[in-house]
Image: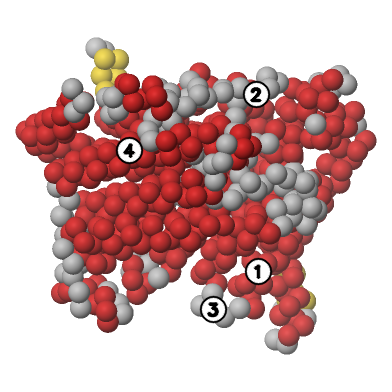
Amino acid sequence: MRYARLLLFAAAMVAVGVLAPHLGEYPLRVVIVMGIEVIMVASMALSNGFTGVFSLGHVGFIALGAYSSAILSLPVTAKHAYLRDLPGFLAHVSLPFLPATLIGGALCVAVAFLVGLPLLRLSGHYVTVATLGLLVIVNVVLVNADAFTRGSRTFTGVLPYTTLWWVLGWVAVTWLVSSRIAYSPFGRAMRVSREDLVTAEAVGIEILPTRMTAFVVSAFFCGVAGALYAHYLTSFSPHAFYFPLMIQLIVMLVVGGMASLTGASVGVVVITLLSETLRNLERGFHIGALHVPPLYGASQITLGIVFILIMIYRPQGLLGDHELVLVPRSRRRRLAGTPREETEVQV
Amino acid sequence: MNVVEYVAQQVINAVSLGSLYALIAVGLSLVFGILNLINFAHGDMMMVGAFAALVLQGAGVPFPIALVGGIAAGGLAGYAMERVAFRPVRGAPDVTALLTSLGVTFILENLGILLFSASPRNFPLPAWLGHVYELAGGRITFTNINVVTLAFAFLAFAFLYWFVTRTRIGLGMRATAEDLTAARLVAVRVNAVIVVAFVLASSFAGLAGMLWAAQVGVAYPLMGFTPMLKSFIAAIIGGFGSIGGALIGGYVLGALEIAIVAFLPAAVSPYRDAVVFALLIVLLLFRPGGIMQVRQEVKL
C-alpha cells in the first residue's frame, strides 16, 4: 500500500474542505487562517529546522509576497483610485489570483537568492540577527515606497480571492514539496550540515547550496502564503507583517517542533486553539459566584509563559523530529538523521 | 546659521543619542561576552526602569530618588529574568536561549500593556531638567536633560570600568568571558558572575530607559524594542562581547544616525533604519570583529 498514506492525507484535506464551511463563520475563518499559517510555519521548518539556519526574516518574504501579489491582482479601477503613482507597466494590468500568487512567490525566490548569497555564509546566531535586519529593511522599504504600497496607510481594495480550497491546495503542495525535499538524500545532507559543519564538509556536502535550496524553497512558500493572506485580509498595512507576526510564527514553529514538518503544523493548531480560547476568556467570565474581570493581554502573557516552559522542558518542541503520517515509515527510517544532540556543556 | 554652528548642534545631538545607545549596548555586550546570549528582552528593561520612575514620581517621590528606584527596578528585573528564564536553559544550544529571550520580551511587553495600556504616557520631569541653554545667540541649544544624560552615562561607564578591573567578581567576569570552562576550573563562581552581569546590564538599561523617556517626553510598553535593536548594532560595530567596543560603537552609531538625518538629502532620512541594518549585514560579512576586532567564528 505505497499510496495509502497519501490517500489518507488527501482524504483528510478533502474532509476539512467539505466540513469546515458547515461549522459556521467564525470557525471557518480560524481554519483558513490556520491553513495559511501552516504554509508559513512548515516552510520555515524546512529552512530553520532542517538546515539549522535560524532565520527571523521569513516574515519579510511573507510581506513581499503579500504586497507584490496584491499590487498585481488589484483591479485597474482600484489602482487609479488608490495607487495613482504606480508605474505604467503595473498601472494597466490586473492579473488573476494564481499568476499573481506565483509571481509573488517568484519575487521572494529572487530576493532570497540574492540576500542568501552573503547571509547564509554566516553561522550560528549571526545569521539570525542578519535575517532580522532583512525584516527591518523590508518593512522600512514598504513603509516608504508610497507609490507602490501607500506607505504606512492601509492598502485596501484587494479582492477576497482566498477561499478555503485555495488554502488547502497550497497546504497540500507545500507539504508534498517540503517532505519530498526533507526526506530525500538531499534532506539528509541538510540535517548533517545542521548537526556538524565539519563532518558535513568531510563527507562532501556543500554547505552553501544545501542551505540555499532550503532557504529559497521556504521563501517561495512564504511568499505564496503572504499572497493568500493578503487576499484573505483584503486590507492591511506594513505593520501586519512585522514583529508581532514574526514572534507568533516563531512560537508556533518552536512549540510544534521545527525539525518536523507536521510538527510545525501541530504547533499552528495548538497555538491557535490556545490563543483563541484564551482570547475569549480574557474578556472576563463567571465560574459560579466567582467573577473574573477582563484582563486584556493576559492571553498573550499566558502564551509567552507556555513558550518559555516549552523551551525549558521540551526545547525540541512537541513532536521533536517525529512526523505524523506524511512519509511512509520505511522511507523515514532509511533517511532519518541522527537524533539531535541536546546539550553540550552543563554549566 | 553658519556651518560651524550647524555641525556643533549636530555633535550635541549625536553625543546625546550615542550615550543612550552606549548605555544599552554595554549591557548587551556584557551578557553576550559571558553567555553567548543575544538577549532580545534587554530593551524591555528600559521599559521597566522608565515605568518604575513614572510610578514612583506619581506617588510623590522626588525625581532623583525615583531615578535610583528605576535603576534598582531594572536590576531586579534582570535578576528575576536570569533566574526564571535563562538559568534553566543554560547549556542548551545558543538558539534556545535566544528564543527564550524572545518569549521574555513577549511576556514583559504584554504585561506592560496590561498594567499601563499601550498608549504613551507623559514622563514627568522636574522643571529644572527642561532648562534650555542657548549658545551663539540661540542657534545652538541643549537642555539639562542632555547634560544629565551625558553625566550619567559617564558615571555608569566609570563605575563599570572600576568594577571589572578592580573587584574580584569583575575579574571573574572577565575570566568567564574569556573561557567559561577554564574560569570554573580556577574556582570562579560562574553562576554568581552571570547573575551580576545580568543585574549590571539591566540596571544600565533601566537608567537608559529613564533617560530615553526624559528625552522624548513619553514612556510606553514597547519603547525598548527599537533602541535595543539599534544598540545591538552598536555593540556589533564596536565588537560584540567587548565592553569598550560597545561604548565606542554606541557613539559611532549615534553619530551615524544623526549624520544621515542632518547631512544627507531629506529623501534618505526615512530610510535610516534600513541603512543602519544594511550596514550591520555588511559589517558582519567583512569585519565581524567590529572596531575592537573581537575574534568571532562568524562565518562557515
Q: In this view of the protein, can residue B225 be seen by the observer?
A: no
The chain ID associated with circle 4 is A
Screen quadrant of the C terminus of chain A: top right
The chain ID associated with circle 2 is A
Q: Which mark is residue A180?
A: 4
Disc 4 and disc 1 in contact, CB within 8 angstroms:
no
* Horizontal side, residue A172 vs residue A264: left or right: left
Measured as percent of width and height from the top left, residue B244 is found at 81, 50
Crowding near pointer 3: few (<14 within 10 Å), some, many (20+)? Answer: few
The amino acid type of the residue labelled 4 equals Arg
Q: CA distance from mark 4 to mark 1?
A: 50 Å
The amino acid type of the residue labelled 3 equals Ala
The amino acid type of the residue labelled 2 equals Glu
Q: Nearer the viewer, mark 4 or mark 1?
A: 4
Q: Residue at x 15, y 43 (%)?
A: A164
Q: Which mark is residue B266?
A: 3
* Horizontal side, residue A238 vs residue B17: left or right: left
Circle 1 is placed at which residue position? Answer: B258
* Horizontal side, residue B230 vs residue B33: left or right: left
Q: Residue furthest bottom?
A: B2
Q: CA distance from mark 2 to mark 1?
A: 44 Å
The amino acid type of the residue labelled 1 equals Ile
Task: Please check whether the numbered discs 4 and 2 fall on a single chain.
Answer: yes
Q: CA distance from mark 4 to mark 2?
A: 31 Å
Q: Nearer the viewer, mark 3 or mark 2?
A: 2
Disc 3 and disc 2 in contact, CB within 8 angstroms:
no
Q: Is B70 or B160 nearer to us in this picture? A: B160
Q: Earlier in the sequence, mark 4 or mark 2?
A: 4
Determine whether the residue tagged by mark 3 lies in a helix, strand or loop. Answer: loop
Determine whether the residue tagged by mark 4 lies in a helix, strand or loop. Answer: helix
Q: CA distance from mark 3 to mark 4?
A: 50 Å
Measured as percent of width and height from the top left, residue A61 is found at 39, 54
